[in-house]
Image (tube, coloured by chain):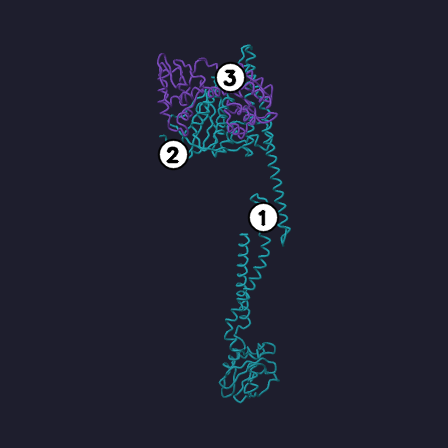
Amino acid sequence: MKNALKLLRRMVLGLLGVMVLLPVVNILILMFTLWDVHGNGGPYSLAQETADALTKDGSGYHLRTDVQERLKEEGDWAVLLDPSGTVVWQTENLPAEVPKTYSLTAVAQLTRGYIADYPTFPAEDENGLLVLGCAKDSYWKHLYPAWDYQLISKAVPYAGIAILINVGVIILIYVLTDMKILRSVGPIMDGIQNLSMGKEVCLKKKGLLADIAGSVNRTSEILREKEYRLKKKETARANWIAGVSHDIRTPLSMVLGYAGQLTGSENLSEEEHRKAEVICRQGQRIKNLINDLNLASKLEYDMQPLHMERVNAVALIRQIVVDYMNTEPEDAYPICWMTEEDVGVCMIQADPGLLKRAVGNLIQNSVNHNPSGCTIYVTVEHMEDVCQIRVEDDGVGISREELKRLNETPHYMLCDENVTGQRHGLGLLIVRQIVDAHGGEVEVGQSGYGGFLAKIRIKIQKEEAGNAPS
Amino acid sequence: MDRDYLKEKRILLVDDEQELLDMVCSILKEEGYQNLCTASCMKEAMEKAAVFSPELAVLDVMLPDGSGFELFEKLKQMGDFPVLFLTACGEDEDKFRGLGLGADDYMVKPFLPRELILRIGAILRRSYKNEEPQVKLADSIVDFSRAEVRRGSQTIPLTAKEFALLSALYRNAGRIVTIDALCEAAWGDNPFGYENSLMAHIRRIREKIEAEPSHPKSLLTVKGLGYKLLVEGR
């Protein structure tokens, strides 16, 4: 409705503009036209000019030639009356029906109106009264130009009031008409605005614009329907992945359990041990993949709830490293804690479970890509206002082309093209998704130790009061 | 005293999948646990628990005749023993619900046998530590029930902080415990900036439990990360 008011204001202002502009333009046009018509100031001034140009000497009256010419051109005639009302001088083209003597009444008449339908214009002359007669139907004269004095004396204020009332009435009618239109436009504008914000819209199909309201309603329905279907599809997909991964969990537990037991069995030959170890290792890969797949799809469709809290990144990462050391006692992948002693506290806002997954994935990544073993180095650095977690190894590393591909091509899970040729694990995708959810950034590259390097940077949260040790 | 008394604890395993029960049994038996009892539904679990009176229960969440959470609450009315959920329900909400009810641990399938063993061991040690008053270390014996250390003919009392630290280390015997976890055990929440105090306390504990504190055999340092307590017989 705010927009409707704005629109109404504009329209009224526009109308006022037109009302001011139109008279001004009209007056200008009128003036221009009149200027053209009465270039010489009208018949009265011509009469006076003629009178001035008429001179008397011993031989009679003489009219100056240029005035004579003009009168002839215009088809005008002139006579000079002496004080007794007799014509003492006349132009040659004086029509026959024009009388030669004038009574006072006739003089009064010719002053006000016409002589034999010729409009006449008197002018003062030193020898009497000069009368200029113009061609018939060339001028229209107002015969009784007298008004009530009261009326004339108040004409200006009266006219002002009348104009104001008229303007007021015009604006009122205009506003009322506009309001009616706007009242039906307003809800439609609001509706379209709501549509753009993704809200549901249901307009009343009434008034001038009922059809448009109907269209807006239909659009809203279509959008809603589409959104619902998309949501349903996404939920179905995420649920499907969750369901499959759930159903795989129990059977896989058994595979892992028995394979684990077999690797520790003393009754098996070396060859059989080796096979059991392969089953174990591959089983663990499936286990990681299931967990990752489920989390990746949930993160992708925003179905993973984040449980953010203030945590000490150093303690969190230290726990991950220790957990790794406690559960993976094999010597093939020793892990080194490279964090400086003086980096004791590095407070960030994070979901500890998810961040653990991200860093755990990076460690697992190093293990997966180096089947012949490597040393893993984990570092937490307190930089200016970011906490940087580095996970690197001295293994096979990554070539420049691979790095480029890793950084530039989207993961197949998020890709709408068929890219079966270049599938890589979910590990790094999840790390990216998790760090994105924390508003941080991930950088991968070549480590100074010779292998792969991944850096996670998350903004440090400013110190809260009351945490200082006693 | 031998530590194997923990291996004699009665453990109730509930899962609707018989093969999984067999496998967990086999893993636990291999580890030395002998008193095991299995059930594949809520009803059976209740009946068996009444006779068996378990000292630890490992429960699945999805059972044919109810949820593991319900079973948990019913079992808790029978006696106060620790419970570990072992389930395929990996959602955070399920995890929070289980732990919120008061479960001692929550493990999501698929699991590594070694992890299950470690967690069960930790729960049992934590829950029944008072039954095992004496822990044998390389050079001494720690008596948790009396908060003292016996080395040779000497008996040395432990301070409250030393006791808390040693308990935390013992609960995770053989595993590294982070500096942060130890500080939390001794000083509670927001344990920042206590690293130096921790080092001082560890030094004093070593003076009590080690024959040569500068060359520790039982309480080992893992540089930058934490400490590890080695217990005899493990």
Question: Type of residue at label 1?
Answer: Gly
Classify residue B218 by image quadrant.
top left
Q: Are marks 1 and 2 in contact (CB under 8 Å)?
A: no
Q: Which residue is mark 1?
A: A191
**In the rendering, at what x and y percent does residue A255 appear?**
58, 19
Do tags 1 and 2 sit on the same chain?
A: yes
Task: Give the alpha-carbon distance from disc 1 to disc 2, as whole Å.
Answer: 51 Å
Q: Position of residue A286 (x, y in %)?
A: 56, 23
Q: Position of residue A361 (x, y in %)?
A: 50, 26
Q: Quadrant of the N terminus of chain B?
A: top left
Q: Nearer the viewer, residue A146 or A111?
A: A146
Q: Name the secondary structure under disc 1.
A: helix
Letter of the chain that mark 1 sits on in the rendering: A
Q: Which chain is purple?
A: B
Q: Residue at x 51, y 86 (%)?
A: A128
Query: What residue is shown with label 3?
Result: B9
Q: Chain of mark 3?
A: B
Residue shown at 63% from the left, 42% from the top: A222
> Can residue B53 be seen in the rendering of this structure?
yes
Compare residues B155 and A406 and report the one nearer the observer.
B155
